[in-house]
Amino acid sequence: TESKYRRHGGNLKTRSTELGSAVTGSSLTTVLPASTTVKKSIVLASESRRELAKQAKVTKEERRAQIDGRHRYLISRLADGIDLSEQQVEETIISDDKFQLIEQFFAPSGLKKLLFFYQDILQQKSNASSRSDRSTNSLPQKKLFITMGSTEDFRGTCAFFLRTSDEVITASNVSQVVNFGMFDCTNGNILQGLEFFLSQIMIPALKSQQNWGAVKEGLKNSQIQEFLYSVDKFVGTLSSSRQNIEDKIQLTKVDIDIYVRNLQNPSDYITAG
């Protein structure tokens, strides 16, 4: 009996040990790989961010090395118009994903226009406190960026450069062949911004223009006068359209109380009608 007990006890102990090992082993195979995967993912994500930051820094320095008199002209105009420092504008430009548009603008027969928007952009907050409250996860912050003008909503200030020649733009001719202008469309009021730009800037400049190229008569020329009249008429139409869109058409207010105060029965209403 003792021998059987020991043998059974030994078997039970062995089975118990094997069962414990099996349970422990299965638990380890379930938990450890998951935690290891998470750690590896965190490490890889961190390494990826560092690599991207490193590449971005290299790209910025390469672009900074490309800056010459042409870029300086653009930067100085933007800084004066938007009230930013030239250093701020430079950092913004070399960090922009559309930096190559500037080179395409300078190239012979290149882009006819180069646009910059300066407006509020939602910036993601990176501090830990913002994670607990999703409603405060992003804040509007003014940002200057290069744009084609067709992909982003326009609700701020537009600064634009227009080229007047198809020749290559160089540091020596950039001030002669590139025009700079701005118009304000705060709150997305594009028609009002365009109306102000034309009526207060462009038309006065055109009417004071002395040199009209091949047209020697200048402002006395009938075609020039017709052109200026058309521009004036267009601005008037633009102003009317803007007022219509803004619900500025107001019907005359009528005091109907004097007509209805003495109406007491159906026949009175019929007579009034």
Image (cartoon, rainbow, N blue to C red):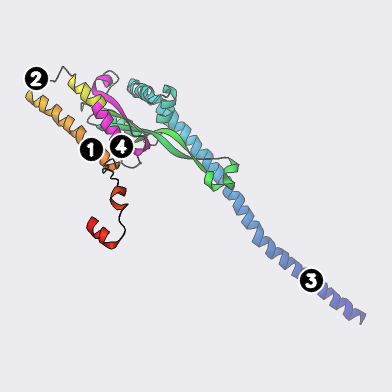
In the structure shown, which secondary structural element does the residue marked by tag 4 occupy? helix
Q: Are marks 2 and 4 in contact (CB under 8 Å)?
A: no
Q: Name the N-terminal-most of marks 4 and 1.
A: 4
Can you identify the residue that label 1 sits on?
240
Q: Amino acid at mark 3?
A: Ser
Foreground: 204 or 269? 269
Can you identify the residue that label 3 sits on?
16
Question: Between marks 2 and 1, how big is the CA–CA gap?
Answer: 29 Å
Question: Residue 76 in the image: x percent, y percent?
Answer: 36, 21
Q: Are marks 4 and 1 in contact (CB under 8 Å)?
A: no
Q: Quadrant of residue 208?
A: top left
Q: Are marks 2 and 1 in contact (CB under 8 Å)?
A: no
Mark 2 or mark 1: which is in front? 1
Q: Residues within 10 Å of mark 4 (few under 14, many from 20)?
A: some
Question: Between marks 4 and 1, how big is the CA–CA gap?
Answer: 14 Å
In the structure shown, which secondary structural element does the residue marked by tag 1 occupy? helix
Question: Residue 241 in the image: x percent, y percent?
Answer: 24, 40
Q: Name the N-terminal-most of marks 2 and 4.
A: 4
Can you identify the residue that label 4 sits on?
190
Can you identify the residue that label 2 sits on?
220
- Asked if the magenta segment contains residue 193, the reply would be yes
Q: Would residue 273 be seen by someone viewing this image from the given angle?
A: no
Q: Residues within 10 Å of mark 2 (few under 14, many from 20)?
A: few
Q: Residue at 10% across / 28% down in the picture? A: 226
For the C terminus, the image quarter is bottom left
